[in-house]
Amino acid sequence: MKSESLELKAEMLKALAHPTRLKILEKLQDGPCCVCKIIPYVGGEQSNVSHHLAILKRAGIVRDKKKGKEVWYEVCDPAVFSLLRIINQIILKNLKNKQKIMEVL
């Protein structure tokens, strides 16, 4: 695999690798949302949430659109949610396997 391709994958995964950014995506799963509603959902400061949104935007995961004075965000490709569901499935399998090991011990 070409190193450019690996770098792009790594950058996207790095952008996803933060609880606040995952929480933002959780909110956006229902569709486009005004940043004014993302901030209270995430429970962070405006500057911190904006920083995380900028990282997601640079990675091509979200895009923004101005509507009057509001800024709305949406996910560029809903396939990102499939990726997150797969990650959840892997985590659940790992936890079940760990539980089985603990039951044997």
Image (cartoon, grey):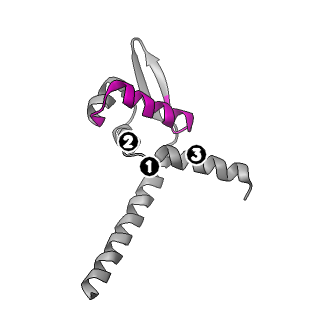
The answer to whether residue 21 is above or below residue 99 is above
Image quarter of residue 69: top left
Of labels 3 and 2, earlier in sequence is 3
Q: Which residue is mark 2?
A: 29
The label nearer to you, 3 versus 2, is: 3
Q: Residue at x 43, y 59 (%)?
A: 87
The kind of secondary structure element at disc 3 is helix
Q: Which region is colored magenta?
A: 42-63
Which secondary structure class fits the magenta region best?
Answer: helix
User: Where does label 3 land, which residue?
Assistant: 11
Could you tell me which residue is drawn at 30 percent across and 32 percent down? 44
Q: Amino acid at mark 1?
A: Phe
Task: Answer few, some or many: residues within 10 Å of disc 1's Cα (few below 14, many 20 plus, some between 14 and 19).
Answer: some
Q: Residues within 10 Å of mark 2 (few under 14, many from 20)?
A: some
Q: Is residue 62 in view from this perspective?
A: no
Horizontal side of residue 28 vs 80, given as left or right: left
- Residue 84: percent from left, percent from top: 43, 53
The reply to whether the C-beta atoms of the residues labelled 1 and 2 are less than 8 Å apart is yes
Secondary structure beneath dot 2 equals loop
